Image (tube, rainbow, N blue to C red):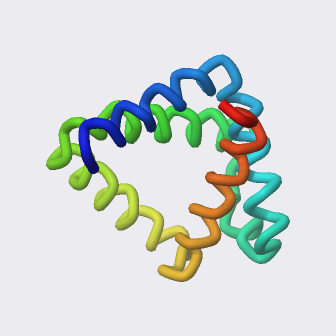
Amino acid sequence: MTPEQITLVQSSFERAGPELPALATRFYQELFARDPDLRALFTTDMALQKVRFAEKLTEIVRAFPRLDELLAHTRALGARHVSYGVRVADYQTVGDALVAALAAILGDS
């Protein structure tokens, strides 16, 4: 990512900051609407899951300027998710759901 792209992602995320709980809720709505079978992978309380999602997303966005840290973090996160039953194909669905949730929360900004 270029420095400009990093700045754009981080500034967009900062605008979403006050809406992180709504973003997490919208993300899971989008995710399960796109692939209802993924719901079975989530065995913890969804309120707690939404908090964890918001925390991880924050960590990832903050790590963008430090590529090595970001890659190590996301590799470990991905490896952990394999044990939950996540398949490679699920990442496209997750990405699409995240973009849709961000668009819904941030609107034109």
The residue located at (44%, 37%) in the rendering is 9
Total number of numbered labels? Answer: 0
Find residue 39 and report its horizontal and vertical position in percent: 76, 66
Measured along the vertical axis of the image, is residue 44 above or below residue 96? Answer: above
Measured along the vertical axis of the image, is residue 56 above or below residue 21? Answer: below
Q: Give the residue at the far left of this rendering.
A: 68
Relative depth, front residue between 16 and 36? 16
**In the image, is 33 to the left or to the right of 87?**
right
The residue located at (19%, 47%) in the rendering is 67
The residue located at (68%, 59%) in the rendering is 97
The residue located at (38%, 41%) in the rendering is 60
Q: Give the residue at the far top of this rendering.
A: 18
Relative depth, front residue between 40 and 54? 54
**Residue 106 quadrant:** top right
**In the image, is 70 to the left or to the right of 38?**
left
Question: Can you say which quadrant of the picture contains the C terminus?
Answer: top right
Measured along the vertical axis of the image, is residue 48 above or below residue 83? Answer: above
